Amino acid sequence: MTRTNLSKTLFSLLDGENEKSASKSSTNKTMQFSIAAVFISFALMQYNDPDPLRWILMYGLVAVVCIYAGLEVKISQNVIKLGVFACTLWCLALLPEFYAWIQMGMPTITGSMKAEEPHIEYTREFLGLVLCGVVLGMHLYPQERNEPAKKVDMHSSQEQHKVDSAC
C-alpha cells in the first residue's frame, strides 16, 4: 500500500468516527429533550398540589439541566450539586414515611390520583425525589464527549520523526 493510499484509508476511518460521534450526539440530544419533557409535564401537574412551588422548582431544575445538556450548553456544577443536595435532604426527611410504607407491605400507591392515606403522598414524593436525584446525579459528571478526530498530515509527522531521531 502506498503512502497516499494509506493516508486516504486513515482519513476515511477518521471521518467514519466523526459520523458515529454525530450519531451519538443526536441520540443524546433526543434523550435529554425527552427527559426534559417528562419533567416539565411533572412540574405542570403540580399546580393542584398542597405545596406546588417547591415541586415545580425541583422538577423545573431537572428539566432545565436536561435542556442545557441537550443543547450542549454548560451549566454550573454547583447548581447541579445544590439540586442533588436538596433532593438528598428532602429524601432524608421523607425516609421514615417511606420505611413505614415498606413495613406495611408496600400497599399500592397508584390506586387513584388522590392520596387518601398519608403514606401514599409521602411515598410518591420520596420516589419523585429519588428520580430527580438520579437524573441530576447523572449530570454531575457527564461522560467525556468524543472530540472529532483530527486529521494528521502524514508527511509532516514523518519529517518530525526524522528530526527527533537525528537528535
Image (cartoon, grey):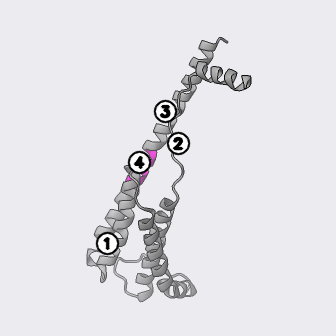
**Mark 2 or mark 4, which is nearer to you?**
2
Looking at the image, which residue sits at the far left? 47
Looking at the image, which residue sits at the far front? 167
Q: Is residue 62 above or below residue 24?
A: below
Between the C-alphas of marks 2 and 1, the distance is 34 Å
Residue found at x 26% / y 75%: 47
**Mark 3 or mark 2, which is nearer to you?**
2
User: Quick one: quadrant of the N terminus?
Assistant: top right
Between the C-alphas of marks 4 and 1, the distance is 23 Å
Q: Position of residue 131 (x, y in %)?
A: 47, 68
Of residue 91 and residue 122, the one placed in the foreground of this image is 91
Q: Which residue is mark 4?
A: 29
Mark 2 / mark 4, whichever is N-terminal: 4
Q: Is residue 113 left or right of residue 80?
A: left
**Mark 2 or mark 1, which is nearer to you?**
2
Q: Is residue 51 left or right of residue 95?
A: left
Q: Which residue is mark 1?
A: 56
Mark 2 / mark 1, whichever is N-terminal: 1
Between the C-alphas of marks 3 and 2, the distance is 11 Å
Q: Are marks 2 and 4 in contact (CB under 8 Å)?
A: no
Residue type, mark 4 in image: Lys
At mark 4, the secondary structure is helix
Mark 3 / mark 4, whichever is N-terminal: 3
Give the dominant element type of the magenta stretch: helix, strand or loop: helix
Q: Which residues are magenta?
A: 27-34
At mark 2, the secondary structure is loop
